[in-house]
Each structure stands twice: as C-alpha cells, then as structure tokens.
Amino acid sequence: MGHIEALVVANLGEEAGPRTLAALAIDGGLMAEQGEAVSRAAFAMALNVALFHDLLDRVSSGAAYVADVLAGGKRVFFDHGALRTVRFPAGPTGDLPPGEDAFTRILIPLGYEMAAVYPLDRLRMTGRAYRHLDHPAIIPQFFLSELHVDRFDAEFGDVAERVFGTSRDPLTGQARDVLVRYRAQEPVYFADAVSALPSIVAAFDRQHEPPTWEDYQLLLSRSNEAAWIATEGNAFNHATDRVDDVATLAERLKSEDWPMKDRLEVSATGRVRQTAFRADKVERLFADGESRSVSGSFFEFISRDLDPETGRLDLAFDTGNATGIFAMTAMQESVAR
C-alpha cells in the first residue's frame, strides 16, 4: 500500500477511504510512493482526498454527481478546492492567524506557492491561487479567499468581531511540528504523518461559535459571503471536477434536471471555462438553539485548454469567473425562520 492510500485509509477508515480513492483519478506514480518518509506531495494529496470526502459528505448533489460519473465508468479529476477566510483590520481572527495566514501556514510547508492574486472587489474580497510546486497539474490547487472586514461599515465590523473573534486554533503541537519539518525539507516519517493529518484536516472547518440569528442577518444584509462563513467557516466552499468539455457536460446536466448554474463562466483568455451546481441547502444550529436552513457548499466543473505560449495546461483562474461562481452560495436578502 502506498503512502497516499495508507494515510487516507487511516484518516477516513476502511470503508470511506478506499471508496473515496476509487472516485478520484490520481497519478499512478504519486499513488505508488512508499518508504519510511512521506513526501510533501503525498501528504498534500492525502489531505485533498480527505477534504474531497468531507465536501461530498456535506453536498448531496456533489455526491450524486460523483456516483453518476462512476456509474459511467469514469473518475473525477480533482482540479481545485476553494475556501473562505476573514481578515480583520488588524490582529488575528480569534485564536487563528489572520485571514489566509491560517492556511498558508499549512499549504506552504506542504509544497504550495502562491500562483496569482485575483481581486474580488465587488465582494470586498481577495482570492489567491495556491499551486503545488512538485506536481502543479496533478495535485489539486487551492483557491483561498479573504473577506476584508475593513471594507465594510462599523456595524458590520462589530458583528464580525463578535462572530469570528471566537475562532479556535485546531492545530495540535504534533501537527505544527510536522509542518515545521516539511517546511525545512526534513524527513517526515509515516507514523508522524498519520498522527498529524486529522488535525490538519480539522483546520478546514468552522472554528468559531454558532452566530446568533440577528448577527447572521446583519452579516447577510451586507455580504452573502460573510453570512456563509458565519455558518460554514473555513470548510471547502466547493470542489471541482476537471472535465474535457464543460459546456457539453453542462447542457447534459441541465437536460437531466441537475441543479445547474444558468450561465457558463468563461475567462478573459477563453481557455478556462467553469460552471457549477447551486449550493445545497443545509440545516445549521444557531446560538439560540434553533436550526435553520442556509446555503451550504457546492460542486463545480472546469475545463482548461493548453496555453499556446507555454504548451502546458492553463492552470490559471479568472476574477470574473470566480465572482460568478461565488454567487452559487448567495442567500436571499432575508431568510425565513
């Protein structure tokens, strides 16, 4: 058994681990890695598999799509996952490092580097793509975005501090030690990698206390994205299947009454095309003890063409595409009880 399979099975269990791996098209050379030390690439891929499983566990439409792909004799090529963070005007986010720093402390030691910045000014956010140095085209990217609290009014800022300021830091000392060793390019042995992975997976979740209904509504009145983070936290906002022809796939899925986005997003270059399912509705507990229906996460689809200047796959994103895709989690201005 290779490192990736062993890490995934240890983290997800004897049933969910192999099932999730069987759904994904992962490079055979990467899957074959064995030996005493676990490479940063293998650890990063195992982390992505665990996060893909978590996304499907929360997004029934995504799980149904993956089942449909498997029924057709194919597998999903996991292109990227996306998550959202909050950056206050100054200081940390509760016990978490500020904004995207809570995740760059994980991604950079695991071999990722920032590939590009995408201003999302309409959303008062900034997106950044993180791409793996060792295997940029076959290990999923992360689209990591920050919501800038200082771009909103004072009332919003007060509520944001109250909600997100309760964030805890899930990283254990052992996980931090493993990340330090990866960053220093020192060997990380299998037993340590297995022990650290659950804590690092747990970072991709909601770390703050449930908001009050009133605070949620205030955030929603200013920003759908802030309201989404209030209930979902730093969980994967979406995971993405890289397909050959997303336009044809979208038309088929629409004809079969899947919950498709109305319009295809096309990058300025024309080489990157994206669409998505609308976000699943989920029940979330609020501070008053009542559960209410809100927007959860969703599943996305992308096609990438070769860049004629490099002859390699265009791994870029696009500000316009991202803004359009973000709308999949938008709620109404007022949410019924």
Image: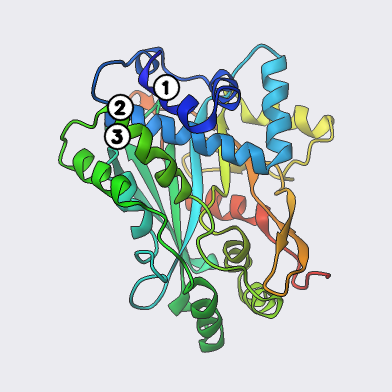
Q: Are marks 2 and 1 in contact (CB under 8 Å)?
A: yes
* Direction from residue 201 to residue 231 in the image, left or right: right
Say which quarter of the image contains residue 58: top right
Q: Is residue 333 above or below residue 16?
A: below
Q: Which mark is residue 192?
A: 3
Earlier in the chain: of badge 1 and badge 3, it is: 1
As drawn, 173 above or below 257: below
Secondary structure under the numbered disc 2 in the rendered image: helix
Q: What residue is disc 1 on?
A: 6
| Among the 4 quarters of the image, the one containing residue 46 | top left
What residue appears at the point 45 percent right and 57 percent down from the top-left corner? Answer: 145
Please name the residue that numbered disc 2 is placed on: 190
Q: Is residue 113 visible?
A: yes
158 or 5, nearer to the observer: 5
Which quadrant holds the N terminus? top left
Q: Is residue 28 above or below residue 320?
A: above
Q: Are marks 2 and 3 in contact (CB under 8 Å)?
A: yes
Residue at figure coordinates x 27%, y 37% from the top left: 111
Task: Give the x, y percent position of residue 202.
Answer: 47, 48
Residue at 19% from the left image edge and 40% from the top image edge? 181
> Three-letter amino acid code at disc 3?
Asp
Residue type at numbered disc 2? Phe
Residue sitting at x 77%, y 73%: 334
Q: Quadrant of residue 72?
A: top right
